[in-house]
Amino acid sequence: GEASLSRSLPFAILAAGVVLTTTAARVLREEPPEAHTGGFGEPTCEHCHWGEPLNAPGGVLRIDGLPQSYEADRAYKLTILLTAHELNVGGFELAARLGDAKQAGHFDTTTPGTIVTTSKTGIEYVSHTLEGVAAVRDTVRWSFVWHSPADARQPVLFHAAANASNDDASPLGDHIYTITVTVSPR
């Protein structure tokens, strides 16, 4: 009795963990948790996905459309591009902040697959939705618009984190990539 209980207990804990992990994976596929860009002390997607090194070789996270220097009160169409070997589904989160960690400009979504949320602290996060997770040939793209601040005096820091997932409904085997880009005013 006692020996079989001790052998079956780890299995029961593992089984419960798989059920919880599968439920969490389904929820995160719809939208990531807020404030997981890796910037200003925030965690990254590694908070829920682990087992692989951060920014491992074989994957790339880019922000296309950012200017070398930005103009005040201008709209810039940005695209997050995540490419990784064996990427089946992907997710991302990005924020644009000034050096004092305050919001820089604002975001608008332009295509299905992205959403903008605002935290209690006033920071906007643009991220994926369920419609935007599918990869095509190991690549996922998300597009949206960033409206630069009306007062263009400070550099803007863009922090993004992305999950290149193997889509096995577990936190293991996924690759997390981060990027930080600073754009100065003109």
Image (cartoon, rainbow, N blue to C red):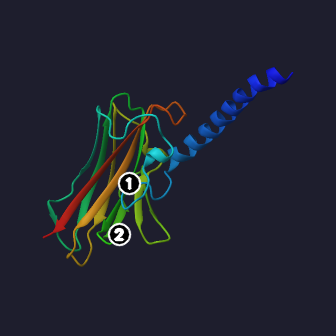
On screen, residue 145 versus residue 10, left or right, reads: left
Residue type, mark 1 in image: Gly
Looking at the picture, does residue 119 appear above or below residue 150? above
Q: Which residue is mark 2?
A: 101
Q: Residues within 10 Å of mark 2 (few under 14, many from 20)?
A: some
Q: Quadrant of residue 24?
A: top right
Q: Quadrant of residue 86?
A: top left
Q: Quadrant of residue 74?
A: bottom left
The image shows residue 73 at horizontal and vertical percentages of 23, 74
Q: Nearer the viewer, residue 150 or 162?
A: 162
The image shows residue 100 at horizontal and vertical percentages of 32, 72
Q: Nearer the viewer, residue 160 or 2?
A: 2
**Residue at image coords 87%, 21%:** 1
Q: Nearer the viewer, residue 8 or 122?
A: 8
Q: Quadrant of the C terminus?
A: bottom left
On screen, residue 6 versus residue 55, left or right, reads: right
| Furthest residue in direction bottom, as rendered | 151
**Residue at image coords 55%, 34%:** 169
| Furthest residue in direction front, as rendered | 3
Residue type, mark 2 in image: Ala
